[in-house]
Amino acid sequence: MKRTIITSLLSLIALFSFAQGGNVQKASKSVFTLTTFKADGSILATTHGVYCGAQGEAIAAFTPFIGASSAVIIDASGKKAEVEALYGANNMYDMCRFKVASKATTPLPIAKTAISGKAYAIGYSTKKAAITPLTVKSTEAFKDKYTYYVFNEEINEDIEGCPIVNDNGELVGLVQRSKTTYDIHSTDAKYYSELISTGLASHDPALQKTKIRVALPDDKEQARLMLLMIDSRTDSIDVVNTVGDFNKLFPEDIDGYSAMTRYQVSRGNIDAATASMENAIKNVKDKDEAYYEYAKQMYNVVTAMPDSMESSWNLTKAADLAEKAIAIKSSPMYKHLLAQIKYSQLDFEGAKNIFEEVSESEIANSEIYYEIAQCKSQLGAENKDVIEDLNKAVEKCPKPLTPASAPYFLARGITLDAIGEHRAALKDYNVYDTLMYFRASPDFYYTRFKCEVQLRQFQQALNDIAHAAFLNPGELTYLAEMASLQLRVGRYEDAIKTCNLCLSATEEYADIYIIKGVALARLERKEEAKESFKKASELGDPRGEENLKKYQ
């Protein structure tokens, strides 16, 4: 009797295997083992996953990637391949989509509809994979279009991360372990499609938990944004791979070469940067863009670090590159760069002429009128003529105003101040301070202080000079100016305190002894005043002796 039961059970298992073989067993070719490694090469974690795309796209749990520096997979045929990059991850559902360095994959199609009855967990094997039948215990909808499954069966660690498929062999999800029970659960495989790379993916809190690089986005604009996020802190191998991916997808686009050049410049490798840009000129479809980008990068480097760069990058060569771009395409953007280069070469007349030409184009903005004003100032133009261009710069500022517009108000304020239009100048200074969120430099507050003194707005002036001194306590001129104004408005005690504060930093400041002496004398403290005047005299200031005689 017992033998008959066993024989019948084996027959049922054989029948089950035969029934599902065509649709389900085929899915085992898509399963792989995943092993992640620490920076020192030691194993961090192992799990399973499945291919879901023809270009090496794959999915697995995200937890094994946390803290990983590298990862490899071994597919059902026993072939090993490296994990190249991550597309996206979700901590809550412990899921990850990534790219494997292998195109010889067997992707598993994703089920379009939810299941309600039976399913099958496909194990990993390089021979014949084990199939575990599952029954749905409960489901829960999320994000209106996805399903979260809980199955009746308990998990076998050997199948964690393996695919769960329907009768058609389509992927329903991956075998996941519950944190509180041994139940098998799974997140809808369709949700993995939302795990895509974006230009800002490197700032994703989940992806920052792994050292494996983020995959380049498929969308061109997002890919460009990712290239812009590359900086000197980015791992050099990641830069090479990311730029390499971009150039494969968009081989005639300048952005990949530009990103590589920026990175090489940030590392001080001008020879490599030169090679990258020369390569761009050879390969990029729009040669004008290549010449312009080369000129721009060279100009930025030379003006930012003029004493540290090699002579192969200089303003003369940058101008030549800009002119080559203009010869191909007469773009106002290219001309604007050439004008900036000429300004840096001290060719103010040449720069002004080009800036004025650009001001008649569609890219005319505040910066260009500001640059025209700078050229005119350098050429000795009247301040009234300069103000006309600064007025245009201010008029062109986008509304509402932002900190980006602050320099134009400051420049106009300084010019108005110079021609005695102090009230109009103060108005611009106040706008500037507001746009800077009241966090301007001490020099600015000193400049506004002097304007306020001219307008006899002494309290505001004292507030500004005190703020300048607070921001830069090492600049004793601010304390001297404050003490002088306190003396002027009759705040003698305050003047003496300010002088003492200054003298605590240095005893070699004759002006301070004079101010202190006068304040003491006004308070009828003549003996102390004489001591102060005597100190000034000893420092070589003739006013010390004059005041000693005056208060004798």
Image (cartoon, rainbow, N blue to C red):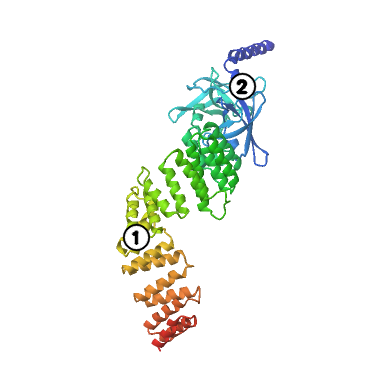
Q: Please state, as top left, top right, bottom left or bottom right, where the C terminus lies in the image.
A: bottom left
Label 2 secondary element: helix
Q: Which of 502/41 is in front?
A: 502
**Mark 2: which amino acid?**
Lys
Is the residue 377 above or below the residue 111 in the image?
Answer: below
Q: Which residue is mark 1?
A: 383
Q: Is residue 134 left or right of residue 334?
A: right
- Asked if marks 1 and 2 touch (Cβ < 8 Å), the reply is no
- Whole-percent x, y for residue 530 in the image: 44, 85
Where does the image place residue 94, in percent across and percent down from the top left?
A: 54, 34
The residue sitting at 60% across, 45% down in the picture is 271
Front one among 544 and 148: 544
Answer with left or right where residue 387 lies relative to residue 258. left
Q: Is residue 13 above or below residue 349?
A: above
Splitting the image into 4 quarters, where does residue 418 fall?
bottom left
Mark 1 packing: few (<14 Cα in 10 Å), some, or many (20+)?
some
Mark before the other along the chain sequence, 1 or 2: 2
Count of picture labels: 2
Given residues 58 and 415, the one toward you in this image is 415
At x 49%, y 80%, the residue is: 539
In the rendered image, the vertical position of residue 257 relative to residue 8, given as above or below: below
Which amino acid is tagged 1?
Asn
Q: Is residue 218 visible?
A: yes
Q: From what the image shows, is residue 1 above or below residue 100?
A: above
Query: How much space separates mark 1 and mark 2, taking CA atoms?
Result: 79 Å
Residue drawn 61% across the image and 28% down it: 102
The residue to which callout 2 is attached is 29
The percent coordinates of residue 390 (x first, y second) are 34, 54
Label placed on residue 26: none
